[in-house]
Amino acid sequence: MENKLDEIISLCKRRGFVYPSSEIYGGLAAIYDYGHYGILLKNNIRDAWWKYMVQYRDDVVGLDSAIFMHPKTWEASGHTAGFNDPQVDCRKCKSRFRADHLLEEFGLNFDKAPIEIINQELDKLREAKKLKCNNCGSTDLTPAKQFSLMVKSNIGSPTDEMTEENVVYLRPETCGGIYLEYKNIIDSLHPKLPFGVAQVGKAFRNEIVARQFIFRTREFEQMEMQYFLHPSMMADKYEEWKNTRWQWYLDYGIPEKKIRWYKHEKLAHYASQAYDIEFDSQFLGGFKEIEGIHARGDWDLSQHSKFSGVDLSYFDEATKEKFIPHILETSVGLGRLFFMFLDNAYTVEELGEDKRLVLKIDRRLAPVKVAIFPLLKNKPQLVEKARAIYDKLKMEFMCEFDDNGNIGKRYRRQDEIGTPYCVTIDFETIEKDNSVTVRDRDTMKQERVGVEELGKYFADKL
Ligand code: ATP
């Protein structure tokens, strides 16, 4: 293995979770496709988020806005002019780096700092002969220059050249769509402040460096919630949302010692608070950002009011006050969460001489809930019985039928995709008492359960 990250990349490919996109053409950097188990897991994570953010609440509604938006959206939000990352190139081996990440390696935090400041810091390191290419060791690195993360398209003007006037951007974050629909939501659903709007969808960023598998990709899914409120409520609601999001991680099996808060010291001029939830990744070697929780002030709606000419203020009937709501945002990458859950679940156990790789993932998130095996493939009565059980259980749970290879191999396969339960149909089932063996993924303990009770047994456990 080249590095630790390769272990999880290899599992994902071997077991059909995630494939590199366009592989037969040599691949496309930092773009990935999700296979059968990948999409099952991803959907379960998305649904777990949606439950906590929308279904369990009466103050948050859903939205699915389009990826393309009017180009003015990104002028108003400041993305067209300012959504950049500082880039440094190695003149010798042509490797490319994010300048703020290079500085981070020396314990210097210049995230989102102006380019002049970043270059001053790089120069200091250069003079001290500390600045080197991480790939080839050369000291011949370019100064940092700003690189736009915005991905362009020519939708609507396919025959024209892509000039600044006719370019339409693929959204770099999903929340823009929420701000643009804010007025329609107020006019159609009449929510009272405070209320939130949640959505899940694709976002696109021309990331300079993307060597972290699905943790940082150029096409990714975000799950964002924008909570609109009166500024006087911000402090309380901010604490509440921080707790709500923290608890979500614990409820889905992330140990408290593996997550922590990172407080942003340098804030955007409109923001009053910004914290990230970071996860201690065994594959990326340390704490990495998973989710941001930001108090964004009234910047977003004020800007869109100004650029569109449409009044986006809110009139409070009770207090007769008219104001632009402030926004509290929770924002997380679905691919990042996917990575985190796999990273956390990935366990290698020593079993005597042998090793077992098992994904100890929360049962509700597991791609397949129950695998059903006839003990032997060449005994029609076993296969028939197993099929009948499978056909019944699959109506309630994501199940899988497998009669390939010996039972040990079948267990291993299911362990590697995180299936919490395996059911084996053997001769006792058909000759004796109509019971089956149910094996637990984590403890590997087996127990006999009557076929008639299986539905209830799994309903209680899953
Ligand atoms: P980073 O510092 O890691 O580049 P960011 O601070 O730019 O992230 P935000 O703009 O706050 O990220 O986006 C919110 C969330 O969206 C992040 O916490 C992350 O989970 C997710 N996200 C952002 N960029 C990517 C990406 N390129 N690939 C996957 N997920 C991403």
Image (cartoon, rainbow, N blue to C red):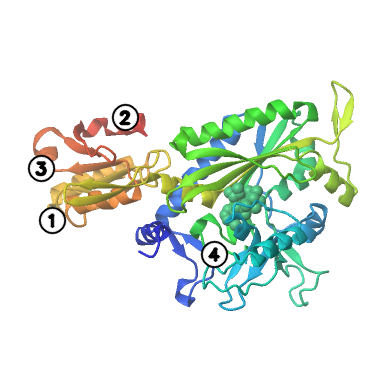
Q: What residue type is labelled 1?
A: Asn
Q: How far apart are marks 3 and 2 (CA)?
A: 23 Å
Label 2 and label 4: CA atoms lie apart by 43 Å
Q: Residue 133 carries which label?
A: none
User: Mark 4 CB in 8 Å range of ligand 1?
Assistant: yes
Q: Name the residue under label 4.
A: 30
> What residue did someone put label 2 on?
456
Look at the numbered disc 3 and give the secondary structure of its residue. Answer: helix
Contact, mark 3 vs mark 1 (Cβ under 8 Å) = no
- Distance from label 2 to label 1 (Cα)? 30 Å
Please name the residue shown 59% across and 62% down the image: 218
In the image, residue 344 lies at what x, y percent? Answer: 42, 44
Q: Looking at the image, tell me whether mark 2 or mark 1 is earlier in sequence order.
A: 1
Residue 44 image position (x, y, % from top left): 47, 44
Q: Do the residues labelled 2 and 1 touch (CB within 8 Å)?
A: no
Q: What residue type is labelled 4?
A: Ala
- Quick one: label 4, few (<14), some, or many (20+) residues within 10 Å? many
